[in-house]
Amino acid sequence: MTEQGGNQRSLVSVIAVLVSGTLLGTAGTAVALAPAEASTTSLGVARVGIGGLILLLLLPLFGGSVRNLSNVLKRGGVWVMALSTAAFQPLFFGATEKTGVALSTVLTIGTMPLFTGLIGRVLFKAPLTRIWFIATSLAVIGLLLRSWEQLENTDALGIVMALGAGLATGCYVNGAKFELNRGGHPVELPAVAYTLSALLLLPLLVGDSLAWMTTSSGILTAIYLGAISMALANTLQVVGLKRLSPAPTATLLLADPLTATILGIWVLDESITPIATLGLILVAIGLVMQGLAERR
């Protein structure tokens, strides 16, 4: 492979992960526009379940095969992906109830690159470069400034749950990387993982009304969450992981809170303070630095 060809493929991987983070960042706005009676639990389960179903249906279009799913189920990394996805939902939503959305997001998204990088270092001996430390630090500081005026008093359990959600994401990314290194298919892996995750989360729906899914707005919300912010977003993430290490991938995924904030301003008419604007600029600088480093 020529150096130019390698650089082009690296650029494609960087773009794939950045787009993934951007699509993940639209989920919050979609949830905010969902029917009022839709609970965060039912929205989360619907997102995972529909995402898995859509990927299963589209497998032939991406070179995958339903007949191969029994073999995919035997892969340990897929179960790590499924369990991590399932654990993230109650951990993150539980943290938001106890600590508030702002602090939960800072702790979960902010520690996610750190957990991902450390696990990747242990599993794959992936180097944690100086540029990664600088880019990630800038992005996390920016995220903290973005939410500074919204931070609320909290309790220890909420903090632990938020950190657990960040750890779950780190486990997911490394589980996917592990299976990709073993020749796993980039669509079969998330298709099976999300389907398993939805099955694991079904008990959480006991006593929860799903009537909102019978309305037109509810159906559109569920399809968007599952098809775009779950299936497409996470497939692009796995595709990018084929050529990127776990640590920089996690840093590039910080496009998620950047997108969420911008959409909150444009779509939900949220206001933003000068210090929060500075925070967004730092996040953007961190993403550009990491993207350029991976491009080279």
Image (tube, rainbow, N blue to C red):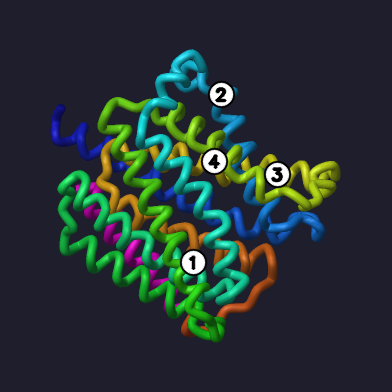
The earlier-in-sequence mark between 3 and 2 is: 2
Q: Quadrant of the N terminus?
A: top left
**Amino acid type assigned to the residue bearing label 4 in the image:** Ser
Judging by the rendered image, the residue that carries numbered circle 4 is 197
Instruction: Kindly report which numbered mark, 2 or 4, lies closer to the viewer in this rendering.
Output: 4
Rendered image quadrant of residue 80: top left
Judging by the rendered image, the residue that carries numbered circle 2 is 58
User: Please, is residue 241 above or below residue 18 in the view?
Assistant: above
Q: Residue at x 73, y 57 (%)?
A: 39
The span picked out in magenta is 277-296
Q: Residue furthest top?
A: 67
What residue do we see at 52% from left, 73% from top? 158
What is the x, y in percent for residue 258?
Answer: 48, 64
| Amino acid bearing label 1 | Met
Q: Could you give the CA–CA distance between mark 2 and mark 4, rounded to whole angstroms?
A: 18 Å
Which residue position holds label 1? 161
The residue at which mark 3 appears reads as 222
Give the amino acid type for the residue marked by disc 2 in the picture. Answer: Leu
Residue 106: image location, x then y, percent: 46, 71
| Mark 1 residue element | helix
Badge 4: how crowded within 10 Å, few (<14), some, or many (20+)?
A: many
CA gap, disc 3 and disc 2: 18 Å
- Residue 155 to residue 191: above or below: below
- Residue at (64, 46) in percent of width and height: 45
Cα gap from disc 3 to disc 1, whole angstroms: 25 Å
Mark 3, secondary structure of its residue: helix
Q: Nearer the viewer, mark 4 or mark 3?
A: 4
Marks 4/3 in contact by CB < 8 Å: the verdict is no
Q: Identify the element where label 4 is drawn.
A: helix
